[in-house]
Structure formats: structure tokens, C-alpha cells
């Protein structure tokens, strides 16, 4: 496995670096809590809104390694724009993998141009980690499905145009009874509830309600009963994206802390001259490097069609834990200033915590890794 970037990957990385410096930075300095539409549309114009999806449907046709590099670079000012792209990628991945030709042609090119924003709706108030226990139901009536239920914590909720929704179609509960559906914004009975304000993120997540929400039966993705597999397939790949954004934000916190350690004086010298601070910086750099390597390995395995889900879980676990540690230490190196909203590291620290929870908490990642380890005794 080669960790150096190809010429094409380096050009892509520089394109994103330039976009972040010229457009993302000034935008974020004045941004409110609204969804960053101008930046999202620009991602489409730059050809960055569908990097790993087929060119035939308007995507970049690139590998997951390139996608990971872009997400890392996009997160150098914090994870929010990287997570916009990563979440938008979940419904794209599902449509690309499980959708029929009509669904692909209808949605994927417009999503690649960032004309349509996507959302992924699995979590419910009583069912997060235990996703097979969802209660939202979809009932087939003639040529329509009628959806009833509630989702929570839906990133892009209210803003997104396309919701990939998991709902129970089978009798009783459990993973085999779950199916997945496309719900378009504007569908009768689709409503949005309370905005949640997750810490560190400039824009919100939102509750989504299905109140006898009617959708055409052709909006079923895959077959009835495929929904749990659909959701887990998307999350396996999604974990590589969470790991990538976490590496980017950890690197950002480290860069701030390194400069600050050099500039800040105490006891007549830079605080970076103290061994206590140097050891902290060394541990931070090592944690980032390790997290980046395992994240690239997960992308590498995926790109070659090899089993990657356990390594993707390891990448998500290690990269988000690394981001938590690095951002915590960055706040420490800044001392009192680290806690101030006038300085950037506290926001990165709060965003890092979100990474340990989304797309399967880090306890769930350990369960996935352990399940893979123990598989050999069950064959
Ligand atoms: C900012 C943000 C954005 C989100 N965006 C989306 C989105 O777009 N779409 C979507 O569907 N969801 C989204 N979520 C929801 C997210 O996926 C869930 O919060 C997450 O899966 C955890 O579920 P929960 O909050 O219900 O926690 P719970 O499942 O209630 O877990 C609570 C605690 O118990 C632990 N735990 C649970 N089960 C076990 C076990 N078997 N062993 C050990 N520990 C366990 C967990 O690790 C956790 O620490 C988002 C959440 C946040 C915070």
C-alpha cells in the first residue's frame, strides 16, 4: 500500500485547499445557522459533490481514497462542510448501489451537481444504536406507500430535497422487516419538527415526521426487507468519511496548537520549549498520523473490492478518538484562551465529540470489530 498521493490526488487536494482558503473561510466568518447553500452549490460546480460515484450519473468516477483526501482537506477549518458532503453521500451511495435505473437517472445527476441535497433518516427517538428496533411503518396501499412515524437527529432535516428513509414493512419488528424509501421534500404528510443544535456545529439537525406521508410505490429502494442491509452498507462506507473528516479537524487543531506553542511565552521562553508541551505535541502528531494511515487503509481496501467493514470501524474509532484527544490537548496548550469562543480550538473540540457518536457510536464500532474477530469460531 502506497501512502503517497498520486499526481491527480495532489491536484484534487490543492483544489480543495484553495477552495477552503478562498471561499469557505470568509463564508464561515460571517455564517449564521442556516444551511451553507452557496458552499454546497460550489461543491457541485467544482465537481466535488459526488466524487466516488460513476461518471455515467454525473459523479467524479474517482476512488474512495480520493474522496477521503477531499473530506480531510475540506475539514481543515472544522468538520461541518466535510460532514455536509459525507451525509449527502449516504443517499447517493444507496441509490447508486441499490437503486433501479429510473431512480439513479432521476436523482444522482442532480445530486452530483448539488442541485438536490440528500439526507439519511434512520434514527428514531427510542432507537439509535439499536437501529433494528425502529417503529416508523410503511404500508403498501395500491400504488402508494403510506409512512407513519418519527425520525430524530436528521442532518439536513428540513433543508434536504431527498430523504432516504428506513421504515418497517414486514410483520413484527427486527432487521428483516425494514425497507428503504425515497421521500421527496414536499411529499404530502412529510413534516419537520424541532431543530436540534448539536454542540460545535453551526447548522442544526432536525426531527422529521411522517404523518400518513404518501409516496409512490416506485420509491421503494431495492426490495421490501432490504432496508437494514441498505442502511448498514451505507454506514460501512460512511465510517470512512467520518474518519476522514475527523483526521482533518484533528490536523487543524494540531496546526493551531503547534503555532501557539511557538508564540506563547511563559517563564521567559516559548511554551513549546517545555518538554511537557513537546510530549503533548508529539503524541498529538503521532495520533493523527496513525488515524490517517488506518483511514487510508480502509479506503484502499474498499477501492479494491476487499472486505473493509472491520477496518472502516477501526478507522472511525481511532480517528474520532484521536480527534477528541488532539482537540482536548489543543485546548490545554492554549490555556485559558483555549476555552474562549474568540479562538478556534474550542469549536474543534466540541465538533470532535460529535464524531465519536454519529454513524454508530464508538462502542458500536467495537462491537462490529469484535464480531469480525470472532467470526472464525462460528464457521
Ligand atoms: C450531530 C448528529 C447528527 C446526526 N445525524 C443523523 C442522520 O443524519 N441520520 C440518522 O439517522 N441519525 C443521525 N444521528 C443519530 C446518531 O446516529 C445516533 O445518535 C447514534 O447512532 C447513537 O444513537 P442514540 O443517540 O440513540 O444513543 P443510544 O443508542 O441510546 O446510546 C446511548 C449510549 O449507550 C451506548 N450503547 C448502546 N448500545 C450499546 C451496546 N450494545 N453496548 C455498549 N454500549 C452501548 C452507546 O454507545 C451510547 O454511549 C445524528 C446524531 C448527531 C448527534
Image (cartoon, helix red, strand yellow):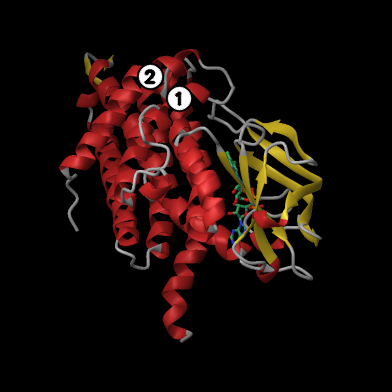
Q: Residue at x 31, y 58 (%)?
A: 303
The reply to whether residue 53 is in sight is no
Disc on res. 370: none
The x, y position of residue 68, in whole percent, is 34, 45
The x, y position of residue 215, in whole percent, is 74, 49
Q: Is residue 39 left or right of residue 227?
A: left
* Label 2 CA crowd tier, 10 Å (few <14, some 14–19, many 20+): few
Q: Residue at x 26, y 27 (%)?
A: 258
Residue 208 sits in which quadrant?
top right
Mark found first going from the N terminus, 1 or 2: 2
Residue 2 sits in which quadrant?
bottom left
Q: Is residue 107 left or right of residue 257?
A: right
Q: Does ligand 1 reach within 8 Å of label 1's beta carbon?
A: no
Pointer 1 with pointer 2, Cβ within 8 A: yes
Q: Residue at x 25, y 16 (%)?
A: 263
Distance of mark 1 from mark 2, alpha carbons?
A: 8 Å
Disc on res. 39: 1
In the image, residue 190 sits, relative to residue 16, either above or below, namely: below
Residue toward you, 4 or 270:
4
Q: Does ligand 1 reach within 8 Å of label 2's beta carbon?
A: no
Q: Which residue is mark 2?
A: 23
The x, y position of residue 236, in whole percent, is 47, 58
Amino acid at each position: 500500500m502506497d501512502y503517497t498521493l498520486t499526481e491527480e490526488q495532489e491536484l484534487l487536494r490543492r483544489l480543495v485547499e484553495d477552495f477552503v482558503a478562498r471561499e469557505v473561510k470568509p463564508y464561515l466568518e460571517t455564517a449564521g445557522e442556516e444551511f451553507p447553500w452557496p458552499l454546497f452549490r460550489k461543491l457541485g460546480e467544482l465537481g466535488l459533490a459526488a466524487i466516488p460515484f460513476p461518471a455515467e450519473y454525473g459523479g467524479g468516477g474517482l476512488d474512495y481514497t480520493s474522496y477521503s483526501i477531499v473530506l480531510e482537506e475540506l475539514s481543515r477549518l472544522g468538520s461541518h462542510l466535510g460532514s455536509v458532503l459525507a451525509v449527502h453521500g449516504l443517499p447517493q451511495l444507496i441509490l447508486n448501489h441499490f437503486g433501479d435505473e429510473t431512480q439513479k437517472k432521476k436523482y444522482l445527476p442532480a445530486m452530483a451537481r448539488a442541485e438536490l441535497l440528500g439526507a439519511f433518516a434512520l434514527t428514531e427517538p427510542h432507537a439509535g444504536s439499536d437501529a433494528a428496533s425502529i417503529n416508523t411503518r410503511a404500508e403498501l396501499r395500491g400504488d402508494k406507500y403510506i409512512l407513519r412515524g418519527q425520525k430524530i437527529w436528521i442532518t439536513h432535516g428540513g433543508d434536504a430535497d431527498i430523504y432516504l428513509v428506513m421504515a418497517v414493512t414486514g410483520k413484527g419488528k427486527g432487521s428483516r422487516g425494514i425497507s428503504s424509501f425515497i421521500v421527496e421534500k414536499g411529499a404530502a404528510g412529510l413534516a419537520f419538527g424541532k431543530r436540534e443544535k448539536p454542540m460545535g456545529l453551526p447548522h442544526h439537525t432536525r426531527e422529521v415526521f411522517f404523518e400518513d406521508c404518501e409516496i409512490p410505490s416506485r420509491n421503494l429502494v431495492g426490495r421490501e426487507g432490504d432496508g437494514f442491509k441498505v442502511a448498514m452498507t451505507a454506514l460501512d462506507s460512511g465510517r470512512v468519511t467520518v474518519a476522514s473528516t475527523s483526521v482533518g479537524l484533528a490536523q487543524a487543531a494540531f496546526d493551531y496548537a503547534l503555532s501557539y506553542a511557538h508564540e506563547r511565552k511563559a517563564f521567559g521562553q516559548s511554551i513549546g520549549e517545555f518538554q511537557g508541551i513537546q510530549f503533548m505535541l508529539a503524541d498529538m502528531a503521532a495520533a493523527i498520523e496513525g488515524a490517517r494511515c488506518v483511514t487510508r487503509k480502509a479506503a484502499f481496501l474498499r477501492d479494491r473490492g476487499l472486505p473493509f467493514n472491520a477496518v472502516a470501524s477501526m478507522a472511525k474509532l481511532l480517528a474520532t478518538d484521536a480527534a477528541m484527544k488532539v482537540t482536548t490537548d489543543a485546548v490545554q496548550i492554549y490555556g485559558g484562551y483555549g476555552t474562549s469562543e474568540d479562538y478556534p480550538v474550542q469549536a474543534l473540540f466540541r465538533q470532535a465529540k460529535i464524531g465519536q457518536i454519529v454513524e454508530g457510536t464508538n462502542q458500536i464500532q467495537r462491537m462490529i470489530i469484535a464480531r469480525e474477530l470472532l467470526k472464525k469460531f462460528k464457521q
